Each structure stands twice: as structure tokens, then as C-alpha cells.
């Protein structure tokens, strides 16, 4: 990124990301590898002249390095200065010739759902991913990908596979789990906000569902519904990731169990709305009216409720009242400044 002017520091936090507390590292996606009695091995295969198969001990005997990286989850939390130790892919590939026909690299996990992700071989050569087994000076915990995971600097963290089992060089891309099944962007560049693919429906279809005010169970990801009159909306179990509800009238809307990750609600009227068991990771509620609103959600990592420090319209705090319901246990998922904001809004302390 370049900036005009003098002494302008390069921004370190990609757009629309939030730093979370140093003491927190959320678990995202699968929580454990596939159960398997075979000893753990890491394989390099596909379009290479000489496949590699290494046990964990053999892997750990190779020359290691420590990398300090910033990690950015697509659900909007970031953590700076994470130290990972392992072997770089370039080091692992010493003495191996990759065929000129290879254009993609697939990283496959030991996973009961066949989890994988892929990168172009060109990007892999640029960023030289780390195959890591230590975080800080400790063994990587199993939930975070131990015994061994990939760390890809400079991309959303879904490109960093946990429980690495196989690295495969391919001529054609093989879309990963999130990219193929959940509409995550295959580029994953946080500086360009490559989070999700385009909407799954046409504008005409969207207009029809909006007029009917019934989204129950529908896949309407990335829906454009800003400024719409949607009071009484029924949206139970709807897939509304990345939907735009800015300034919409959503009084008494029912979003029970809906997926609203990264949805925009800035300045929406949400009086009496229900978000029970909904996923609001990364959603933005700045400037909303949350009086009588039920926010006892399933998950709220990276959710934003405006700012303590600025009253700019895009960052205003929500309106709440005694009937705004939240589950205090969920506060631990908020960043420190968002937690403080809730405290000040509600005049009560979250559990420490
Ligand atoms: N095997 C596997 N790897 C995975 C995932 C997953 O579900 N399964 N989730 C990805 C996503 S979306 C993120 S943000 C990071 C989360 O890593 P963490 O749980 O250690 O924070 O792992 C990535 N790697
Ligand atoms: Mo993620």
C-alpha cells in the first residue's frame, strides 16, 4: 500500500479488522483432527519428482525457524506478533523438483470432513508458509492445529490449515473446504477484504424475498437490504452472512439461529428484534437501536458495537435499555474496547 504525504505509517490492521486481547486466541472451525491410529506423518506429493514422507520426529529434526506473524481471521479478529516455530516449506522442499506444470498447492488436514485449503504455487513461493509445531515456546495445542499446522503469512487465517497431513502440488486448483462449501474468497487477501464471494441470488430474487419479509431458512448471503422497511421480518435459520441491513427498519425481526457473520446493521432500527442463538461474528451494530432487543447469541467474536472514543455517525454507540438482553458469558468473545463499551452502555460489569 502506498500513501502520499510524509511520515504516514503503513497501517498494520487490515480494513474492518479488530485487535483482540493478547490473552485470547479464538478457536475457529474444527476443534480436533480425525481419529486415526496411524502415526502422524506429513507427505509432500503430486507434481514433484520425489515425494516426501516424514514422521513428526523426522520433521522436527530439520532446520527450524521462528516467524513472527500477524494473524487475521475472516470473522474480523486479528492478533499481532504471534511467534510460530517450525520448518518453512522452502526448506522442506530442498532437493525436490516441482514440475513446471504445477500451479497450485493444496494443504490437506487430517480431518473427518476432508478439510483442505489451497494457494497458488506463485503465492506459496512468495510467502513461504511455515509448517509449525510451536506457538510461542509451547507445543501447539490440539485445538489450534497441534501437533502440526500450516501458517500462511499475509492471508486470512482460513488459508492456514490445522493438523497438516499432506501437501499436494497440482496443475488445477482444488478449492478448499471453506472456499468450496462456504463461499469464502479463494484469494483471502485481508488488505483487499477478499472475504466472501458474490451473492448467491439475483437482484430480482432478492427484491421478491424482501417484499415478502420472510427469509426463513433461505440462503441470502451478501443480500443488499440497506434502508429497507423490514419490520416483523422472519429470518429464522437464514444464511445472511455479509448481508447489508444498514439503516433498515428491522423492528421485531426474528433472526433466531440465523448466520449473520460479517453482516452490516449500522444505524438499523432493531427495537424488539431477536438474535437468539444467532451467529453475529464480525457483524457491525454501530449506531443501532437495540432497545428491547434479544442478543443472547451463539457467537459474537469480532462483533462491533461502535466506538467509545468517537461519536462519528458510522461509529456511534447503540441505544440500549433495561430490556436489551445479552448473555454476559458471551462478552469474553468481544475485544477489550467493545467489552468496555458494553459496560458503559449497560452500567454493569461483564464477568472477568
Ligand atoms: N483442519 C482445519 N484447519 C482450519 C480450519 C478448520 O476448520 N479445519 N479453520 C480455518 C480457519 S477459518 C481459521 S480462522 C483458522 C483458525 O485457527 P485457530 O482455531 O487456531 O484460531 O484455522 C483454519 N484452519
Ligand atoms: Mo477464519
Image: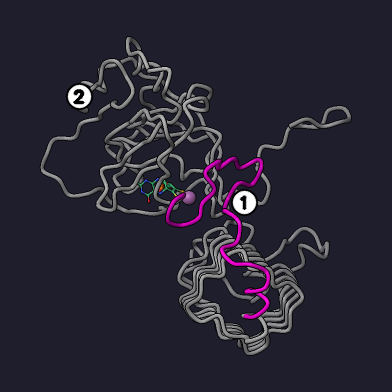
- Up the image or down, 149 lies above or below 123; here it is below
- Up the image or down, 314 lies above or below 11; here it is below
Q: Position of residue 109 (x, y in %)?
A: 30, 42
Secondary element at image label 2: helix
The answer to whether one can see residue 350 in this image is: no
Q: How many marks?
A: 2
Q: Quadrant of residue 144?
A: top left
Farthest right residue in view: 5
For label 2, the crowd category at 10 Å Cα-Cα, with few meaning under 14, some 14 to 19 and many 20 or more, is few
Numbered tag placed on residue 202 in the rendering: none
Q: Is residue 207 magenta?
A: yes
| Residue located 56% across and 46% down the image | 78
Range of residues picked out in magenta = 179-208
Quadrant location, the N terminus:
top right
Numbered tag placed on residue 57 in the rendering: 2
For label 1, the crowd category at 10 Å Cα-Cα, with few meaning under 14, some 14 to 19 and many 20 or more, is many
Q: Position of residue 55 (x, y in %)?
A: 19, 26
Secondary element at image label 1: strand
Label whose residue precedes the other's in the sequence (2 or 1)? 1
Disc 2 and disc 1 in contact, CB within 8 angstroms: no
Farthest top residue in view: 95
| Residue located 53% across and 62% down the image | 281
Q: Quadrant of residue 222?
A: bottom right
Q: Position of residue 47 (x, y in %)?
A: 33, 23
Q: Quadrant of residue 268?
A: bottom right
Q: Position of residue 23 (x, y in %)?
A: 47, 48
Report whether the residue tagged 1 is closer than 8 Å to ligand 2.
no
Q: Is residue 9 left or right of residue 57?
A: right
- Up the image or down, 200 lies above or below 57; here it is below
Q: Is residue 87 magenta?
A: no
Say which residue label 1 marks. Answer: 18
Predominant secondary structure, magenta span: loop
Amino acid at each position: 500500500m502506498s500513501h502520499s504525504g510524509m511520515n504516514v505509517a503503513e497501517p498494520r490492521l487490515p480494513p474492518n479488522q479488530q485487535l483482540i486481547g493478547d490473552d485470547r486466541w479464538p478457536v475457529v472451525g474444527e476443534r480436533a483432527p480425525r481419529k486415526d491410529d496411524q502415526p502422524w506423518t506429513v507427505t509432500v506429493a503430486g507434481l514433484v519428482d520425489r515425494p516426501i514422507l516424514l514422521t513428526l520426529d523426522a520433521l522436527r529434526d530439520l532446520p527450524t525457524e521462528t516467524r513472527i506473524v500477524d494473524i487475521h481471521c475472516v470473522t474480523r479478529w486479528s492478533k499481532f506478533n504471534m511467534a510460530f516455530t517450525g520448518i518453512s516449506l522452502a526448506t522442506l522442499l530442498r532437493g525436490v523438483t516441482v514440475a513446471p506444470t504445477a500451479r497450485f498447492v493444496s494443504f490437506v488436514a487430517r480431518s473427518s470432513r476432508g478439510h483442505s485449503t489451497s494457494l497458488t504455487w506463485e503465492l506459496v513461493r512468495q510467502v513461504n508458509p511455515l509448517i509449525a509445531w510451536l506457538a510461542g515456546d509451547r507445543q501447539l495445542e490440539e485445538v489450534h492445529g497441534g501437533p502440526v499446522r500450516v501458517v500462511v503469512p499475509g492471508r486470512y487465517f482460513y488459508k492456514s490449515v490445522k493438523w497438516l497431513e499432506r501437501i499436494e502440488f497440482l496443475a488445477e486448483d482444488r478449492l478448499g473446504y471453506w472456499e468450496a462449501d462456504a463461499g469464502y474468497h479463494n484469494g483471502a487477501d485481508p488488505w483487499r477484504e477478499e472475504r466472501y464471494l458474490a451473492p448467491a441470488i439475483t437482484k430480482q430474487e432478492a427484491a421478491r424475498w424482501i417484499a415478502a419479509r420472510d427469509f426463513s431458512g433461505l440462503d441470502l448471503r451478501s443480500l443488499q437490504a440497506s434502508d429497507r422497511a423490514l419490520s416483523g421480518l422472519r429470518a429464522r435459520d437464514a444464511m445472511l452472512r455479509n448481508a447489508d441491513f444498514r439503516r433498515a427498519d428491522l423492528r421485531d425481526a426474528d433472526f433466531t439461529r440465523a448466520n449473520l457473520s460479517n453482516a452490516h446493521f449500522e444505524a438499523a432500527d432493531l427495537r424488539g428484534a431477536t438474535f437468539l442463538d444467532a451467529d453475529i461474528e464480525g457483524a457491525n451494530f454501530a449506531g443501532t437501536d437495540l432497545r428491547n432487543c434479544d442478543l443472547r447469541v451463539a457467537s459474537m467474536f469480532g462483533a462491533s458495537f461502535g466506538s467509545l472514543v468517537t461519536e462519528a455517525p458510522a461509529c456511534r454507540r447503540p441505544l440500549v435499555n433495561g430490556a436489551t438482553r445479552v448473555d454476559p458469558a458471551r462478552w469474553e468473545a468481544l475485544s477489550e474496547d467493545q467489552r468496555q463499551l458494553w459496560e458503559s452502555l449497560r452500567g454493569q460489569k461483564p464477568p472477568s
